[in-house]
Image (spheres, rainbow, N blue to C red):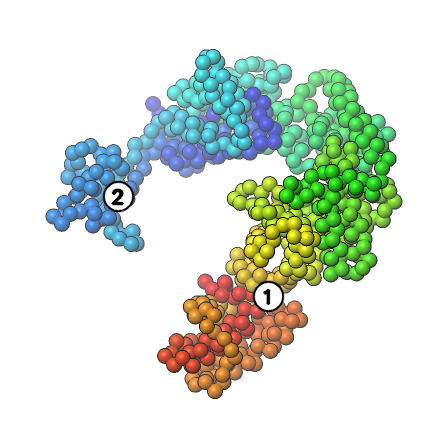
Amino acid sequence: MSHAAKSLLVELLVEELPPKSLKQLGESFGALMFEGLQKLHNLDGNAQLTTFASPRRLAAHITDVPERAVQKPRKVKLLPVSVGIGADGEYTQAFRKKLQQTCDYPDEISPSVLGERISREFDGKAEFLFHTDVSAGFPLAVNLQQVLHALITKLPVAKMMTYQLADGWNSASFVRPVHGLVALHGAEILPMVEVLGLTAGNKTRGHRFEASVNPIVLRDADSYAQQLATEGAVIASFGARRAEIMKQLAVATAGEGLKFAEDEALLEEVTALVERPNVLVGEFDAAFLEIPQECLILTMKANQKHFPLLDVNGKLTNKFLIVSNIRPSDASQIVGGNERVLRSRLADAKFFFDQDRKKTLYSRVAGLDKVVYHNRLGTQAERVERIWAITQAIGLQLGSNELAAHAGEAAMLSKADLLTGMVGEFPELQGIMGRCYAQHDGLADDIAYAIEDHYKPRYAGDELPRNIAGVCVALADKMETLVGMFGIGQIPTGDKDPYALRRHALGVTRMLIEKRLEISLEDMIGISRGAFNNKINFGNTESHQLLDFIYERTSSHLREQGYSVQQIEAVIAKRPQFLNEIPQRLAAIRAFSALPEAGSLASANKRVGNILKKVGSKIGGPVNVALLQEPAEQALHAVLTMVMPKAEAAFKLGEFSSALQELAALKMPVDAFFDNVMVNTEDAALRANRLALLAQLQQAMNRVADISKLAI
């Protein structure tokens, strides 16, 4: 049998897979197989992975796979020499037992074998005994069997299906029932490979309706994609299928002189729903265009998986694109069927829209007292009252009585659209419908847009509210949620965050930083806590927890913006109450880091911090100049006295870079101090005075950021 490397193909033929997770399933299927074979030394160094995923198949193609795993040296750490070798210089019974258990040795171990394979090595702490051997290279079929069984349990599947196998007795579990298994190494079938009650073969199936041959007999691993395309009418590659859909969408759109509403999530989902895409143009009654286009677009995308067509100004037209899974010579029936179904959905939307407009938003506010928000936090009406109070207070801090009044009006109406038929049918439209109905009621645009925008940012990277009134309501909405949930102990743990508190905290961070808002975190927490009127238990502990939570989200956000971890930690360590200052502080730290004195000052600052930490709260009082005996401490005090006022003045003006630049003058006297002055002298008065000097130094150096975090 030849040991030459050949391509490997493995395919699971399944019932229709969940479209929203198909791409991830396909990528994970291939990646887990590749990693598994790699760990078993069953891949050539040039091996390349290609994944395939269609509604009815998961497959992976790997090049340069040898028939047998490469033999590799294996080193196993056993016991410390002190335990493994006795006083007589012989291996102990404990060592022999460990060797039998760990390396599968027989009871009688040959001394010559031990001499060849046992070595003594220092691991950094102690001298250990190691065993080195060459692991046997198993055949590909054996390794693949092991890898497949493992990866089936590791795939990112939210919930497995248990189904009955063809024998009628046994069952298996997978994301969907599996009906076929292909395992080809070159042209050779690997019949030893069995998984989910199936034995590997070389046959698969193509398109349910348009395959020219079924089943398809695969010639070899490399012909998989080509045979599926020509004989099975299937584009097996997720990426190739997506590209084909994009190409057809562009051609169809150009033919209409329009543009389609781009939506990455919809494109991914449609790619996962078809095996042979065919883009067609549909049309609906133009009378439906009186409905807000957000409603129509959501209906087309979410319910029908259609791509709405827009004119050059971004306004919705009455045409849309269908991605069909079949290519008949006459597509009129497909188009007509899609148009009929969409017409029914749009008629429902029109009915809700017409009915909703018969009542004003103001008239709906009273009904919120019958809608439970949270069993421990009351109704939506109570929540709106809190949001209104917080909004007004924030508005007064950020602007004027007029801003507070406008923002307060938007806050009072912010949840009214939850009681409309349209939002009841399409919850994703909350806020959007509030804006539409507010404009219909004749309210000012800034109030209407604030109602829509108070949910923003809805996700990472989403836009922020368009006007300052919207910012006030958005901050109030998020702070009310954060304070309320922390007040009843609903703090996110691990990956669980049912109330999206991380998203709310990130939204607060982004608005304060990007809108450069002059309002402190402590003020917003205090305002929000007051709005609950002792309904929750929110004291200093909860306040500290919430501040920590917001700073964590701020750090994560800044890392995504490209700032270094050290620089972020230096700024966040100071827990700046005004987050709008953070970009300037980071810019100052970045400029300071470029100074030749920066490294030395950061290290000195860290040393100062360690010294002061040991004495804790014992430091106090000003520096007594009369007790400064050493020339080095006198020089440090003199330079510090000169630098501190300049740095403090720059800090108060918000000129953080200038404040840090002033510190460069401290390098030489600080170095000289540590070289020539003993801080922990036996004289208590001198020691206390030198600690006071260091405390003053630390305060001056860490005004903008904790520069000790920059120490390497």
Specify the quadrant of the image occupied by residue 34: top left
In the picture, the quarter occupied by the N terminus is top left
Query: What secondary structure is found at the residue carrying circle 2?
Result: strand
Relative side of 36 to 460, left or right:
left
Q: Is residue 597 above or below residue 382?
A: below
The amino acid type found where label 2 is placed reads: Leu
In the picture, the quarter occupied by the C terminus is bottom left
Specify the quadrant of the image occupied by residue 225: top right
Q: Nearer the viewer, residue 378 or 417?
A: 378
What residue does disc 2 label? 78
Q: Residue at x 30, y 39 (%)?
A: 74
Q: Residue at x 83, y 41 (%)?
A: 363
Q: Nearer the viewer, residue 523 or 93?
A: 523
Q: Nearer the viewer, residue 183 or 374?
A: 374
Callout 2: few (<14), some (14-19), or many (20+) C-alpha neighbours within 10 Å? some
What is the x, y in percent for residue 303? 71, 28
* Extreme-top residue of the structure: 168
Q: Nearer the viewer, residue 216 or 303?
A: 303
The amino acid type found where label 1 is placed reads: Ala
Callout 1: few (<14), some (14-19), or many (20+) C-alpha neighbours within 10 Å? many
Q: Is residue 43 above or below residue 215?
A: below
What residue does disc 1 label? 588
Relative side of 531 to 676, left or right:
right
N-terminal of the two: label 2 or label 1?
Answer: 2
